[in-house]
Image (spheres, rainbow, N blue to C red):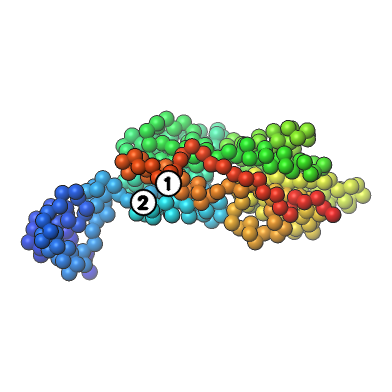
């Protein structure tokens, strides 16, 4: 059955299509109360569904927020998405979601799709990359964002600015103190650990991972401890698992050869990598913290069920999503500041059972 049209509603109500549009699409220019009521009754009787794009043109707002994340199945991004959704409800807006796998070329396509749908704002969460293979994608993403902002769009990026983005108006960056917090974690761990440290990190050039590696090494240096070995792998659970297998082999090989097993404290630069590494150690018959200590970063919700409890750096992930959304929304609401600030966020080192010295 064909959907009812605005022309049919106007004909039944005895008004022009322009008048019917002003009533149903939210224009500031409204006809008299009796006429408006007649149009609404006609729309109800025909089952007319207003056109969202027409409403957006009438209101100069689509009521849409675009959210771009690397992987919504990752608890880190899921928590940020919850915060975005909560802030969107406060603004009476709907969230459009795009998952990209972390590639800037895919992020560029998502921005273009949101811009074509006249999204009022876009929130981007996920590590930036300075790798050579991402240079072209970064340039295209930056150009797409600059074009979107020039046309009145608002953008909030979590962590680092998009590489090469030049937009000033409508472009906000929520800085995450990854380097500083990783340094604090290293200092606290080094105070109670006299063995070796190993960092399980993402690919070199992934800025969030690099910040956390740099900060952790700085913290070890300040504590008078030698630098940690760095194992590079993919920035996900699978990468952590692969690194964990390498470390498990090292520990078991030393034990089988009659030598003392290396006393390792593993720092994985995000919690899902730490979970993967821990799973690999367990698969080889090793126990945490008896055979190796391990710590992560982010404090994702999944850790509530992880045993032994994982030492990590707690980030307010849902707050990050709320702050990013409000940072863009308040600029659209006549400058009404609702208390959100795009300036940055804080975190907290949380030591748990996974890094306690073995009995």
Residue 169 x %, y %: 37, 33
Residue 43 x %, y %: 18, 64
Q: Is residue 72 left or right of residue 154?
A: right
- Residue at the location (41% across, 36% down)? 171
Question: What residue did someone put label 2 on?
Answer: 91
Pointer 2 or 1: first along the chain: 2
Residue count near mark 1 (Cα–Cα under 10 Å), binned few <14, some 14–19, many ≥20: many
Residue 309's mark?
none
Nearer to the camera, 355 or 201: 355
Residue 31 x %, y %: 12, 54
Q: Which residue lies furthest to the right in this view?
A: 258
Q: In this view, does 180 lie to the left or right of 137?
A: right
Residue 325's mark?
1
Quadrant in which the N terminus appears: bottom left
Q: Is residue 69 left or right of residue 270?
A: left
For the question of whether residue 7 can be seen, the reply is no
100 up-or-down from 5: above or below: above
In space, the residues marked 2 and 1 are separated at their CA atoms by 9 Å
Quadrant of residue 203 within the rendered picture: top right
- Whether tag 2 and tag 1 are in contact, CB under 8 A, the answer is yes
Q: Residue furthest left?
A: 14
Nearer to the camera, 136 or 267: 267
For the question of whether residue 237 can be seen, the reply is yes
Q: Is residue 339 left or right of residue 21?
A: right
Quadrant in which the C terminus appears: bottom right
- Residue at the location (77% across, 41% down)? 191
Nearer to the camera, 264 or 232: 264
């Amino acid at each position: 059955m064909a959907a009812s049209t605005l022309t049919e509603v106007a004909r039944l109500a005895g008004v022009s299509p322009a008048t019917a549009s002003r009533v149903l699409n939210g224009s500031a220019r409204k006809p008299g109360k009796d006429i408006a009521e007649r149009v609404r009754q006609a729309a109800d009787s025909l089952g007319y569904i207003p056109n969202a794009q027409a409403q957006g043109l009438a209101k100069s707002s689509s009521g849409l927020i675009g959210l771009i994340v690397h992987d919504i199945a990752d608890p880190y991004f899921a928590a940020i998405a919850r915060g975005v959704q909560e802030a969107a409800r406060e603004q009476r807006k709907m969230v459009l979601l795009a998952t990209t796998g972390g590639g800037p070329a895919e992020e560029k396509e998502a921005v273009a799709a949101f811009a074509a749908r006249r999204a009022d704002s876009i929130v981007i969460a996920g590590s930036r990359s300075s790798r050579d293979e991402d240079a072209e994608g970064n340039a295209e993403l930056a150009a797409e964002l600059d074009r979107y902002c020039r046309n009145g769009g608002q953008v909030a990026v979590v962590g680092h600015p998009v590489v090469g983005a030049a937009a000033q108006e409508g472009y906000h960056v929520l800085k995450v103190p990854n380097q500083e917090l990783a340094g604090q974690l290293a200092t606290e761990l080094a105070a109670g650990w006299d063995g070796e440290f190993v960092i399980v990190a993402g690919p070199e050039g992934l800025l969030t991972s690099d910040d956390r590696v740099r900060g952790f090494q700085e913290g070890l240096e300040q504590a008078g401890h030698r630098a940690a070995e760095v194992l590079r792998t993919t920035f996900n659970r699978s990468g952590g698992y692969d690194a964990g297998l390498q470390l498990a082999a090292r520990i078991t090989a030393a034990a089988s050869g009659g030598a003392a097993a290396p006393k390792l404290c593993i720092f994985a630069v995000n919690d899902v990598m730490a979970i993967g590494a821990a799973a690999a150690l367990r698969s080889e018959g090793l126990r945490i913290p008896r055979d190796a200590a391990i710590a992560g970063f982010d404090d994702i919700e999944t850790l509530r069920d992880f045993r032994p409890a994982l030492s990590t750096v707690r980030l307010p992930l849902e707050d990050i999503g709320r702050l990013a959304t409000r940072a863009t929304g308040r600029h659209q609401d006549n400058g009404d500041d609702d208390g959100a600030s795009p300036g940055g966020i804080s975190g907290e080192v949380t030591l748990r059972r996974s890094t306690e010295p073995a009995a």
